[in-house]
Amino acid sequence: MEAISAFIQGFAYFGDPMVWVFVLLGMVLGIVFGILPGVSGLTAMALLLPFVFHMKAEYALAAFAVITATSATGGSITAILLNVPGDTANAATLLDGYPMTKKGEGGRALGAALMSHAVGGFSSMLICILLIPLVLPLMYAMKTGDLVFIILFAFSCVGVLSSEAPLKGMIACLVGVMLAFVGTQVQTGEPRYTFDSIYLLSGIPVASFAMGLFALTEMLDLSVEGGSIAPIGKIKIPMRMVVQGCVDVFKHWSLWIRGTIIGLVIGIMPGVGTSASPWMAYGQAKATSKHPELYGTGYVGGVIAPELCVGAVVPGDLLTTLALGIPGSVQMVMVLSALITLGITPGPSMLQSQLPLTFSVMQVFIIGKLIAVFFCLLLAVQLAKVATIPGHYLVPLATLIIFVGSYATEGRFYDLIILLLFMVVGMFMREFGFAIPPLVIGFVLGDLFEKYLSIAINNAGPFFWVRPISLTLICLNLLIIFWPQISSLWSKDKKGASAA
Amino acid sequence: MKSKRDFYAYGFTLVMALFMYQSAANFVYSSSRLMPELLAIGIVILSLAGLIKATIKYRSKAVVEEKKEKKRHGDRQVKPYLLHSLWFFGLFVGIWLIGFLPSSVIFILAYLRVNKVSWLKSAVTAGATAVVVYGLFVFLLEVELFSGILFGARI
């Protein structure tokens, strides 16, 4: 009952016209940055992060939710029309999308891809909304001690799963937690790792830290590699074909169900990342198809399967970020940073105290996605031309906004030093094969981890973890940490059995 | 060479963790010390494991193959990154000296000219960008931008 009333209250936020302004702003940023090669929705979020300080929570979250919803939408346009995926998530769409354009069926491919996006996102988010009332009693049953293991679970997942080198992933995560300790310790008031600097007493600013690691390193990459593609010739997209593509999605209803389930499950699993799921959906669709030979030759099913999955993966990711405070992807790290900047603690406490806002984020996601798909269907060719904007126009403009934004957050010049410092750290981390997301997740959740741990020990003593929820989470943690060993044992057993 | 790079990377994290442990040992309260010390120990253990792994790999046959591969393809170019990062650092120094507005015009103009954009386009883009950024932050968000130490601003 509480969930239903909160769901209805969530719609009340849409009565404020400014929410719609931020929905449109998020949509434009998401689509444009999704289309531009070399940058992504992540850059759009990093650029928006310094403004979060000046916004109401519902405005900021509306913009961030819509960027997550739309960044891969624009990417599918360039993947199909220009053979250049705007976002890594759209890479699997190339296999059949571009061959369809070459066969003169570009409109059909676009219609199918964009409708798949809308349908995948809508069905997946609907399931997530329906899941909330089910997980709510569990959230209420959780105590501070359990939250320690939820954060630990996030560390294990992101450290072990998201990185190609798990050891480096775990080190990056622990260093991130260490960085969170810079500043005054809340309980004792003692300065830690401040090196007698007054500036560092309040800790490392999240906005400059995240912008330096993600946005500025991305700008440096774009500056070195360039980011535009050759101007496109005339492409005609008849509306009749677009409609045919849209109808195709509903004809392939089994792909719809499977793509949504794969996307949702992978989205909910923290650390797996969104870029792998479309390939899984594509492979699964091809393996179960009656005509697997058609895949890769310009078959509409090869566009629908990965795009459905791309649409369905983000709601699951958003659910774990909001409900558990565990970000499943780099984009969700930015959402988490925005929440913390706004003074909202993500996780079970957000579901308990900010349930209408949580529902509103999910509603705005669906609305933003549907509007974005509608616009993309109408303006696909014009939007594809955005990809031809040369990178050397984008780099100085975006860099300037990052610098000014970093300074404007708190009006401190030293924030610019932090910004540049973490650009250098990001460059070195990439050069030496360390994944950046574990560092940021460690940093963002490090403070909370220490706070919850000390509260849990003070309230329940050193055996605070002897509770069913905590013990379950400990088992899950161990499972994640030793997953590589378990899976290799499993595959050895399978091989042995098949050899016998 | 990957294993050599790994060796340096783990070596660096090991030294950093030892420094963090040493610094944490000087904290007055035990509750301030506990977590940093535990984490530093964790990083030390993981770094040592990484160092051992990198050493074993370095001595293995795989490295011979890596060396051959390196000869064939060469390493990733670091020099362009260093050169391009100079612009970012230059912008920072410019802001420190003369403030946001003049340095944004100068550095955007310089960036576009280096990328062989015509004088006219570069000047228009630099001017328009400065106006947009100034309008957005100063007028809309009422942020007082840093005016540079040469113009009397204090850090």
Image (cartoon, coloured by chain):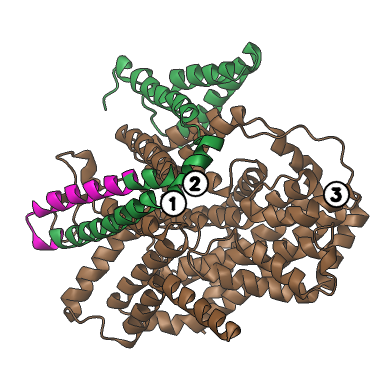
Chain colours: A brown, B green
Counting from the top left corner in percent of width and height, residue A236 is at: 89, 43
Q: Is residue A437 magenta?
A: no
At mark 3, the secondary structure is: helix
Counting from the top left corner in percent of width and height, residue A47 is at: 50, 42
Q: Amino acid at mark 3?
A: Thr
Split into 4 quadrants, where in the image is the C terminus of chain A? Answer: bottom right
Look at 86% across and 56% down and name the residue there: A108
Q: Amino acid at mark 1?
A: Lys
Q: Is residue A213 above or below residue A230?
A: below
**Marks 3 and 2, how far apart in space?**
42 Å
Look at 22% across and 46% down and name the residue there: B15
Counting from the top left corner in percent of width and height, residue A12 is at: 57, 66
Quick one: label 3, few (<14), some, or many (20+) residues within 10 Å? many
**Marks 2 and 1, how far apart in space?**
7 Å
Is residue B149 visible to the viewer in this orientation of the structure?
yes
Asked if marks 1 and 3 fall on the same chain, the answer is no
